[in-house]
Image (tube, grey):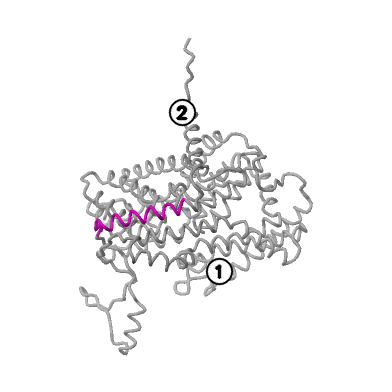
Amino acid sequence: MDQSIETSPAAEQKGFLNWIEKAGNKIPNPTIMFLYLIALIAVLSAILSWANVSVTDEVVVPVPRDEFSQINEHLGGTLSLYDSVTGEPAELPEYILKEETFAVRNLLSVEGIRHVFSSFVDNFAGFGVVAVVLIAMAGVGVAEHAGMMGALIRRTVKVAPKRWLAFILIFVGVLSSVATDAGYLILVPLAAAAFLAVGRHPLAGLAAAFAGVGAVFGVNLLITPSDSMLVEVTNEVLTSAGQKPLEVTQNYYFAIVSSILMAVVALLVTVLITEKRLGPYDRADMTVADEAEGIDEAGEARGLRFAFWALIAFVAVIALLTAPPGAPLRDPVTGDIIGTTPFMASLVFIISLAFLVCGVAYGAGARTLQGGNEAVGAIAKTFGSLGGLLVMFLMIAQFIALFNWSNLPTVAAVSAADLLQQADVPAIVLLVAFILVIVLLDFILPGLVPKWVIFAPVFIPIFASLDVAPQTLLAAYRVGDSPVNVLTPLMVYLPFMVTVAQRYKKDAGLGTVIALMIPYAVWILLTWTILYVVWFLTGIPWGPGAPVGLN
């Protein structure tokens, strides 16, 4: 009788992911790893610079409007702009297309070494993620120290159907891209704790929420600041080419369907792959206090009531600062609330302040936080726990800044664009190839808007010659940009995910998080690409007045 044992695909996948986790956790501490990466790009930049590697490309650059205004004032306001075709008065554009040559710059040259030393402090000072993390975690730290976070999670999981918990967390993660950073910093830790509270593996909750926030970042049910910036860059390219500009809703139908469908995919991956691989959770692995016992339910209920009324008052104040015409948080020119506005720019601070206010109110009601000194102490304790993360951010900031200074990302991006341009294949094949190119480049150049600034002037004209509308290309760009956000080491919040994972698994490392997120990235990318192809072939408009082809 044949005694051989057949392994199921699920078992093989579990073994593969376990191998990824073990191999990944053997990678040096992320801080050391980024030191190695800096050394690698320094050597690579030297080799390519000595080989005189360069690319020429059209890029979108801002017009120096302030300088023009100052010159005009010195000349008595006599300078006027006119359209060369119509002869009508024209306004100075915010951006123009400019052809530039990008040569690889040598980090080991005299100039490069001088830049490494002279820019070190500025690189870290200009790394905005540090400030965002500290501000976001200040309010959360007070709420957590007071006990509100645990109480809120316990009450929520009691009333929320257990079967819907994962989908709710994932979908909230998808929607959180309207606030950019808050989803990573607030929702992911909450999701891990929520899963633990209902007896599910906390790392599965972390992975589910991280997938919703990061792997589906490019779409939303709402119009986000990123939408406005993407369309603004696109319109500068179109206007310079004499084409009709797009509206901010150009991908709205596709974004709605994608948001819902990708959340469902993430849910299926969580239930069918992640939780089966992780198995039951052993609370002995926890490195944070387990609040499952010794709960003062009466004090908790009183604290939550205080927090609720504090939240109502806080929302009322924010509404007064936002809703009335001319309110401080409206756009001072257009009066808009959504888009590139003070309100949207303030969301992280508003959310953190909400946690702070509610945390103080909860502490007063539950008698777990007495006075301002304890609140300040809670913030200080939270900042202290982020020490290792801040050291990692120091090295990440240096790597990203030096990598960009070397022009290596731009050379790689433009070279990939040239390969696509030379291919003589149907438009849909090129669009899928474009998605895959964006996926690969996202590993070295994460960030939704920065890549589009490079790609828009290159690819929009290429695909226009194939009767592919810019909104069609932009939809493809959204598909390619998001899924591997949860895998690239250059994703600035990946070290934070490791920090959260270590609360529930003592030996968790970078490999742990990457192994968790690989199934999400693969299945979301595959499903999303199929959706895009079907959408393109059926000719469904991407949004209101946004057809697949050029009119």
Q: Nearer the viewer, residue 396 or 202?
A: 396
Q: Nearer the viewer, residue 546 or 471?
A: 471
Position of residue 145 in the picture relative to residue 103 (left or right)? right
> How many neighbours does mark 1 have within 10 angstroms: few (below 14), some (14-19), or many (20 or more)?
some
Residue 80 falls in which quadrant of the image? bottom left
Closer to the eye: label 1 or 2: 2
> How many neighbours does mark 2 have within 10 angstroms: few (below 14), some (14-19), or many (20 or more)?
few
Q: Over which residues does the magenta segment extend?
A: 33-55
Amino acid type assigned to the residue bearing label 1 in the image? Ala
Picture coordinates of residue 311 (x, y %)? 66, 61
Q: Quadrant of the C terminus?
A: bottom left
Picture coordinates of residue 271 (x, y %)? 54, 36
Marking on residue 9: 2
Residue name at image x 40 percent, y 62 percent: 229
Residue 328 falls in which quadrant of the image? bottom right
| Residue at the disc numbered 1 | 323
214, above or below 355, in the image: above
In the picture as drawn, the residue positioned furthest to the bottom comes out as 76
137, above or below 173, in the image: below
Residue name at image x 47 percent, y 39 percent: 519
In the picture as drawn, the residue positioned furthest to the top comes out as 1
Amino acid type assigned to the residue bearing label 2 in the image? Pro
Q: Residue 447 in magenta? A: no
Position of residue 244 in the picture relative to residue 368 (left or right)? left
Q: Nearer the viewer, residue 68 or 290?
A: 290
